[in-house]
Amino acid sequence: MPKKSRTQQEVDTVKEEILGHALQIIQERGLEGFTMRRLAEERLGLKAATLYSYYESKDHLYLAVLTRGFQLLYRDCEHAYNSATASMARLQAMMRAYLRFGIEQANFYNLMFTWHVPRYQDYVGTPMEAAAQYELEESQKVYLFFIKVVRELIETVAPATDDQIRAYIIYFWSTLHGYIAGINNQILAYMHDNPLLLREPILENLFKYIEQELKQMAENSPEAV
């Protein structure tokens, strides 16, 4: 009797399980210590050949893990955005969501933003270019979402150029990323008894900076003259 084909939902469930175990191995052993055989035999109880029926290669699976991380971060940011109606409240909620993801999903975050791992440019001209392009597009959704929200906020008081928006995004991200990285690599534990207690003060200082910038922009706006 022929083996019953799996439904798409069953296939998706298995692929999610594969991604989860792949991420754990990459976190524990680094990308260089991650192999399809190790994943299949040590974590999933499968033959490597079975694993290849879900993902074509180690690189395809790695890119799928990276892509999934950005999709989860985007989902969290979107939920945060929809939790408020005012522009400032939306940006604050998204910053909180970003910081929370970075700490609570440290395995994903380290791979996405901290470690020196292959990116899109490393796959141009290879069989993985399409998968890498998809990962790049998914990662850019988070960046473009923050640009949208920052623009919405700034333009409540004055027009803003693309360069201004990008500069603010880089400043916000650098502050949050520095703190998240310090928590995840435990460097901040050498600088503070409980660095997690700095979470709210760091966010509040960022919010105050944004409010000050908005106030200054409003005062310098031609309409205020």
Image: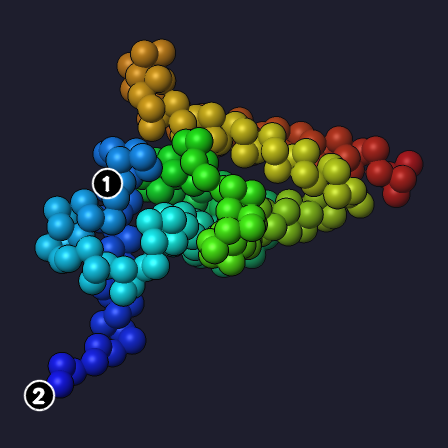
Q: What is the CA distance from the residue labelled 2 to the residue labelled 1?
A: 37 Å
Amino acid type at image mark 1: Ile
Answer yes or no: is residue 27 visible: no
The residue positioned farthest toward the top in the image shown: 191
- Residue 57 % position (x, y): 34, 54
Secondary structure at badge 2 equals loop
Residue at left offset 15%, top offset 57%: 47
The reply, left or right, for residue 174 in relation to residue 12 is: right
Foreground: 126 or 212?
126
Q: Looking at the image, tell me whether mark 2 or mark 1 is earlier in sequence order.
A: 2
Residue at 41% x, 31% y is 115
Q: What residue is pinned by disc 2?
A: 1
Which residue position is annotated with label 1?
25
Q: Nearer the viewer, residue 69 or 207?
A: 69
Residue at (10% x, 55% y) in the render: 45
Task: Work out which quarter of the rendered image holds the C terminus and state it.
Answer: top right
Q: Residue furthest bottom?
A: 1
